[in-house]
Image: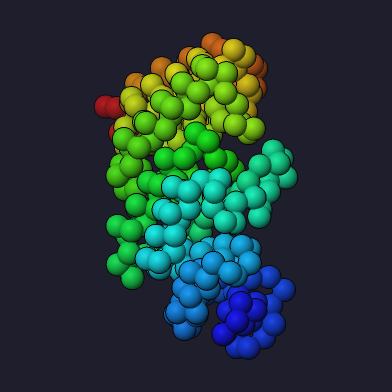
Amino acid sequence: MGADELLRTGFDGDRLSSPYDLIEAGIEDRRHRERVPGLTALLADGTAPATDRFLACYALTAWAEAGGYSEVIDAAAAGKQTSWYDTLIDRTYSVDSTFAHLAMAISDGEHLARGKETESKRTEAVRALVGIADTEYFDGKLEYVLDETTAESVIEDIKSVVERGIQSSAEGERPGFDLPTQLVDLAAAVATVDGPTAVDLATRVIAEETHSHYRTLNHAVSIVYRAKGLQGQVFGEYLKSIGNEKIRSQVDEVLASRHQLSQQENGPRA
């Protein structure tokens, strides 16, 4: 089968307007397995158009195939030298968004990974993407992959990449997108499994900014809710002390929600 048959023809033989329609359908349709050998061959074909190779990788990853995860790992290692780099460009920052899409593909195939027993390979792919989050843009999609189990598995990688991001910012390097917010999102992803680490990382990211941007602080508010116990509350007060009225209002709402939830869990006092 050629690329058009593999990527732009539905499982019932209908012509599709977008390859993503096929990929989305395949997540729930077992017939996607029939496309795996052809897509694997397309992915390995160095003469094929870069866009088609990327779509093959995206499909195999969304369908939780080990070959897709392996290619994500290789792409992360190659970085800007990846053959399909810049085939997708983010509209806001005008930077590559292929890695953001691959993160989304990993997220889409989570339940398939359990059935195909490729969960360990999936975690390796997540680790590879986390490892480049200080230089590549993820459009907020990487944190969706970081459920509690996965976040706990890659927490040391998250610490390392946030450290590097803080260091590069201190040295005046700017990757062309909102790196501080992306780093805060990574910190927030570990807040439910390690609140102190999440608060520490986010606080250091925010402190490195000469002027704390609203967007970064806005994303940091999620840590106030996710971090259990005193850490979240103290972090919320910190955000209120440096944020504008909108941030203070958001934090107050989250703290009130935390208080209400705590009362519901503990029940009325005698």
Measured from the top left, where is residue 36 in percent x and y? Answer: 46, 77
- 170 or 103, nearer to the observer: 170
Q: Quadrant of the N terminus?
A: bottom right
- Check the image and report above or below for 24 versus 213: below
**Residue 266, quarter of the rendered image:** top left
Count of numbered tags: 0
Residue at the front extreme, as displayed: 47
- Quarter of the image for residue 117 reads bottom left
> Which residue occupies 34% across, 27% down?
197
Does any portion of residue 54 appear in the rendered image?
yes
Q: Left or right: where does residue 82 sit relative to residue 266?
A: right
Which residue is at the far bottom?
13
Relative to 171, is 8 above or below?
A: below
Residue 214 image point, x, y percent = 63, 23
Question: Residue drawn 57% across and 41% down?
Answer: 137
Q: As drawn, is 198 to the left or to the right of 152?
A: right
User: Where's the C terminus, which quadrant?
Assistant: top left
Q: Position of residue 105 (x, y in %)?
A: 51, 59
Q: Residue at x 43, y 42 (%)?
A: 130
Q: Is residue 192 above or below residue 173?
A: below
Q: Is residue 42 left or right of residue 94?
A: left
Q: Which residue is drawn at the image coordinates 59% and 31% (left, top)? A: 175
Which percent across, then down, holds residue 194? 31, 32
Q: Is 270 placed left or right of 207 in the picture?
A: left
Colour scheme shown = rainbow
| Residue at far left of view | 270
- Please say whether residue 258 is visible from this viewpoint: no
